[in-house]
Amino acid sequence: MKFIDEAKIKVEAGNGGNGCCSFLRLKFMPEGGPDGGNGGSGGSIFLRANEGLNTLVDYRYTRSHKAKNGEKGRGRDCSGKAGEDLFLNVPVGTIVYDEDTDEIIADLTADGQVACVAQGGNGGVGNAKFKSSVNRSPTRTIPGTPGERRNLRLELKVLADVGLVGMPNAGKSTLIHAVSAARPKVADYPFTTLHPNLGVVRVGQHQSFVIADIPGLIEGAAEGAGLGIRFLKHISRTILLFHLVDILPLDGGDPVQQFNSITHELEKYSPELLAKERWLVLNKIDLLFPDEAKERCDDIVRRLGWKGKVFFISGLSQEGTQELMRAAMAFLEQSKIS
């Protein structure tokens, strides 16, 4: 499943019903006066977040949505029936844009959250409302107003609890493959991950969280280089970041320099990102003998001056991955309590 899903739809709220022009005519009241009722209001269109959905694919095939019109007023002061509102279910994490103005209309981040995206038209006014002492037989009515019409762009930003950051080929896809049922493409060339993958990590009974394998960053990502912007504009929703570092890069690069490069891109894009909890995860320890791997990892931590949490893992052999996932689960549960 793609991390970002988009769909463009057209919504049209219902028109308000027209007001009625009518005069009461009964056997014993031949001149009963005006009794035209008001028109009903048109139905509005709402988007409702539903945690049971995880894609916008339905809206790629059904692109036009219209609510019911309000009924016109009737005699004997009967108002027209209001048009029924239309509710469209979308996944949690959907941002709604006005396609014509690029304005954000709504950001649906919680299950059951509702946003009105097209307001129904107001009902018209019947002639009974215009009766007065100086105008006993008004014929004036006011028609209903048209419903709002909009072209919308729906953008799904899936809400992951944990985001994986790091250089291309740091081993993010391999790690998510090891700890979840997700099966991202894995290869030894940059940008294997073109669309971030999601995986559900199950730590124990009733204990799980969503982890996102996000495209690798390169220098200049904050300015749009590589796949940077496609990643950076979504990562702020995560609670915890795993900063994966390849302890033995294929290109012979310095892991410390690569770590600092990613940190710099995060800070340039949004200083708030660095305020998030970020754990240093040194990956691919299986490439060296245990003593050599520990020595190299300790050297990286020392040169970085890292004071936060550190984990030594191998996504390929799954060494250390379960300890990392259990620690993440404990942190997420504690975060929700506090």
Image (spheres, rainbow, N blue to C red):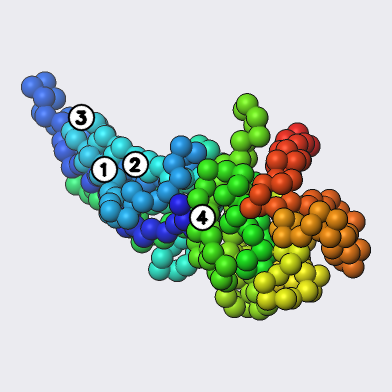
Amino acid type at circle 1 is: Lys
Splitting the image into 4 quarters, where does residue 60 fall? bottom left
Q: Is residue 253 above or below residue 330?
A: below
Say which of 170 and 268 sits in front. 170
Taking the spot 24% from the left edge, 31% from the top edge, the residue there is: 78
Amino acid type at circle 4 is: Pro
Q: CA distance from mark 2 to mark 1?
A: 8 Å
Q: Nearer the viewer, mark 4 or mark 3?
A: 4
Q: CA distance from mark 2 to mark 4?
A: 37 Å
Residue under circle 4? 184
Residue under circle 2? 86
Q: CA distance from mark 1 to mark 4?
A: 44 Å
Element under disc 3:
loop
Residue under circle 1? 68
Q: Nearer the viewer, mark 2 or mark 1?
A: 2
Quick one: which residue is furthest to the front in this view? 289
